[in-house]
Image: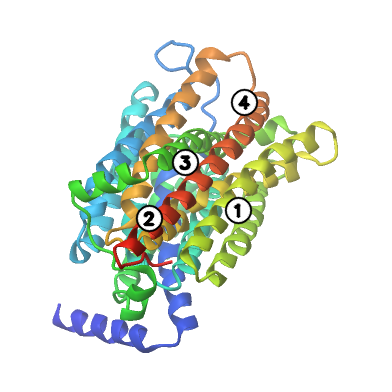
């Protein structure tokens, strides 16, 4: 234990002294890898179709029940995380991350054991711990001069990992992973035979076990990051845990702007989750069968991640926090516009299904990613108030995942006869129009609110940090 602490101190000390690009590369790698691995415990079940199965004889398909059940657990986790993650101290973060993932994997094992009609119970308990992972990872990255780059790198993890994990899960069910283990002495042949016949029920747990060692290593690397420097604090304000009175005061101060943001996020999260959870079915409807397009999800999501990374990394060049906030909201608005525009192009026959899925993914993530990263980081920095962006992130997430549950059920109960592809196309237009209206309204309100606060503070002889 003493040797481990010395090793940690040496690495942390090196990171405090190293050049900026080296620190950014290390921090992005550690955070990216940590959250990438988390998706191996959250998303692999969505690679299965569970065709022909309904939940308890109702009009709700079994896969919809599974998706909805996990989202309910995930949304409840976000609600719990408003308190737990915003109050979490540095010393408890790493062990908490490990404990959350171990609980999630145990739930996936239960998912494999239980009969089909009880699997929604297991997937609920799988989602329950996972919703807090994002906030704990963001704690390590926010409040730094390079936070835009760090948070963008982190955000790319769940864009890329979602596609790769689903392709990995589909490969497991097709027997394409078993050859990886054939070289192991004694146990290799047995593992190869077992992994060649992984069922839909056991595939999620097996996928998680493949990524568990890498997750442990990634958390250890992440925990070596030093605290923000004095220059970071000067540029982005001190980031501290927030108690209930501080959280209430922040929400009250920006109530209308936050309400507009959360309304847009309510439908955006539902849209993004629908695309993510039913990507396999939507691609099948577009004519892209798995047999002929084994890595198509990884291809679309990699292109999306590159586009998001390029667009949002440009915010790093904006030092003024007010302009950075406006820039983030401008990029989010363009994402909503892209969702509607790409759907128009598909309906006009000007692009094919592959590029439509790529562009709707790019648009949805351009709007979605800033909610969990730079948007609230810039807002906190603009107010010069001590606190953490994790609180605002989790407030929005709680509302957003509630919307996701509502839309999942609405599709099966209200439009059960409509294919998921047709529903998604119409949903694209609705989200685009509503999102643009909410974002523009919120941007005008928040910037005006901050400007009025500047005038008031000047009268008192102080000024908010720009």
Q: Residue at x 50, y 43 (%)?
A: 442
Q: CA distance from mark 3 to mark 4?
A: 27 Å
**Residue sitting nearer the eye, 298 or 310:** 310
Instruction: Give the quadrant of residue 211.
Output: bottom left
Residue linked to disc 3:
261
Q: Along the polypeptide, which appears first: circle 4 or circle 2?
A: 4
Label 1 SS: helix
Distance, label 1 to label 2, CA atoms, is 25 Å
Q: Count the marks: how many?
A: 4
Residue linked to disc 2: 453
* Color scheme of the displayed model: rainbow
First of labels 1, 2 by sequence position: 1
Tag 4, which secondary structure? helix
Image spot of residue 315 (x, y percent): 55, 65
Instruction: Look at the numbered discs 1 and 2 and tell me whether their residues touch, using CB distance below 8 Å.
Output: no
Question: Pointer 3: residues within 10 angstroms few (<14), some, or many (20+)?
Answer: many
- Which quadrant of the structure image shows residue 252? top left
Q: Nearer the viewer, mark 2 or mark 3?
A: 2
Mark carried by residue 420:
4
Q: Mark 3, mark 4: which one is toward the viewer?
A: 3
The x and y percentages for residue 432 are 63, 36
Lower sequence index among marks 2 and 3: 3
User: In percent of the image, x 69 and y 46: which residue is there?
Assistant: 359
Relative height, residue 385 to residue 263 (above, below): below
């Amino acid at each position: 234990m003493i040797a481990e602490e010395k090793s940690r101190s040496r690495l942390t000390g090196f990171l405090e002294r190293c050049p900026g690009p080296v620190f950014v590369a290390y921090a992005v790698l550690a955070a990216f890898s940590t959250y990438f691995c988390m998706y191996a415990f959250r998303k692999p079940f969505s690679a299965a179709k569970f065709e022909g199965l309904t939940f308890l004889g109702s009009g709700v398909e079994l896969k919809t029940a599974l998706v909805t059940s996990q989202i309910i657990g995930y949304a409840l986790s976000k609600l719990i995380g408003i308190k737990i993650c915003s109050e979490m101290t540095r010393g408890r973060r790493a062990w908490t991350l490990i404990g959350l993932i171990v609980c999630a994997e145990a739930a996936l094992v239960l998912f494999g054991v239980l009969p089909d009609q009880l699997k929604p119970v297991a997937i609920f308990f799988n989602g329950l711990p996972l919703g807090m992972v994002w906030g704990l990872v963001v704690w390590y990255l926010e409040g730094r001069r390079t936070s835009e780059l760090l948070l963008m790198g982190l955000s790319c993890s769940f864009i890329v990992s979602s596609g790769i994990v689903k392709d990995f899960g589909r490969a497991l069910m097709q027997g394409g992973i078993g050859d990886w283990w054939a070289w192991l002495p004694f146990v290799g042949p047995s593992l190869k035979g077992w992994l060649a016949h992984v069922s839909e029920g056991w595939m999620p747990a097996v996928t998680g076990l493949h990524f568990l060692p890498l997750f442990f290593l990634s958390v250890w690397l992440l925990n070596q990051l030093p605290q923000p420097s004095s220059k970071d604090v000067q540029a982005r304000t001190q980031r501290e845990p927030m108690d209930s009175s501080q959280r209430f005061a922040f929400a009250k101060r920006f109530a209308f702007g936050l309400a507009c943001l959360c309304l847009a996020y309510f439908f955006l999260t539902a849209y993004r989750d629908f695309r993510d959870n039913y990507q396999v079915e939507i691609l099948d409807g577009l004519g892209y069968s798995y047999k002929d397009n084994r890595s198509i999800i990884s291809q679309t999501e990699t292109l999306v991640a590159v586009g998001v990374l390029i667009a949002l990394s440009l915010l790093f060049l904006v030092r003024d926090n007010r302009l950075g906030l406006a820039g983030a909201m401008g990029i989010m608005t363009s994402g909503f516009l892209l969702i509607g525009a790409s759907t128009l192009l598909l309906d006009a026959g000007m692009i094919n299904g592959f590029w439509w899925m790529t562009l709707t993914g790019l648009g949805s993530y351009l709007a979605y990613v800033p909610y969990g990263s730079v948007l609230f980081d810039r807002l906190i920095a603009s107010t010069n108030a001590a606190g953490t962006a994790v609180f605002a992130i989790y407030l929005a997430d709680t509302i957003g995942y509630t919307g996701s549950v509502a839309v999942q059920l609405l599709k099966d109960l209200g439009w059960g006869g409509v294919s998921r592809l047709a529903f998604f196309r119409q949903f694209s237009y609705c989200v685009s129009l509503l999102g643009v209206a909410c974002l523009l309204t919120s941007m005008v309100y928040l910037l005006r609110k901050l400007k009025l606060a500047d005038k008031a503070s000047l009268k008192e002889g102080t000024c908010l940090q720009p």
